[in-house]
Image (cartoon, helix red, strand yellow):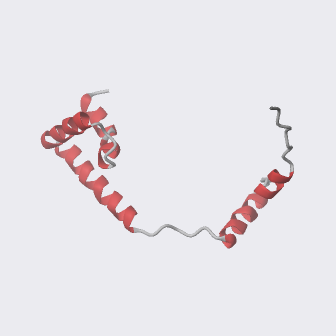
Amino acid sequence: MTQDELYQKLVDLYVGDELPEDLAEDLQARAFANPALAKDIRSMRHTMSALQSVSAPVFGKESYQRVLYRLYLEGATPETRRAFAASQYQLPMSG
C-alpha cells in the first residue's frame, strides 16, 4: 500500500475530526500536493454536512410491525423483548 492509498483511507476519519493532530496535519499537507485527495476531502465534508442536516427518521410502532411482518415472510422467527424477558430465570444472590 502506497502512502497516498493510506491517506485516502484516512479521509473519513479526518473529516470526522477523529485523527490525532499530527496525523491530521500530515494529511492536510498531503492534500495540498495531491488534488485528488483534496477533492475527496471536500466531497466527504459536503456529504457529511448534507447527512447531518437531514432529520433523523422516526421508527414507530407501525415501522416495527412492518419489519416483523417482513421477517416472518422471509421465514425468520424473531424473539421479541417480551418473550425474552418472560423466559429469564432469577438467580439467587449469595452474600
Outermost residue toward the left in this view: 33
Query: Relative to residue 64, is residue 15 depicted above or below?
Result: above
From the viewer's perspective, is 55 left or right of 63? left
Residue 32 lies, in percent from the top left, at 13, 43
Query: Relative to residue 26, is residue 68 depicted above or below?
Result: below
Outermost residue toward the top in this view: 1
Q: Which residue is pictured at 22% across the width and 50% down the height?
A: 39
Residue 70 lies, in percent from the top left, at 72, 62
From the viewer's perspective, is 75 left or right of 1? right
Q: Which residue is pictured at 24% across the width and 39% down the height?
A: 24
**Observer-nearest residue: 55 or 94?**
94
**Figure quadrant of residue 59:** bottom right
State which quarter of the image contains the N terminus. Answer: top left
**Figure quadrant of residue 73:** bottom right
**Observer-nearest residue: 17 or 40?**
17
**Observer-nearest residue: 74 or 16?**
16
Q: Which residue is pictured at 34% across the width and 46% down the height?
A: 12
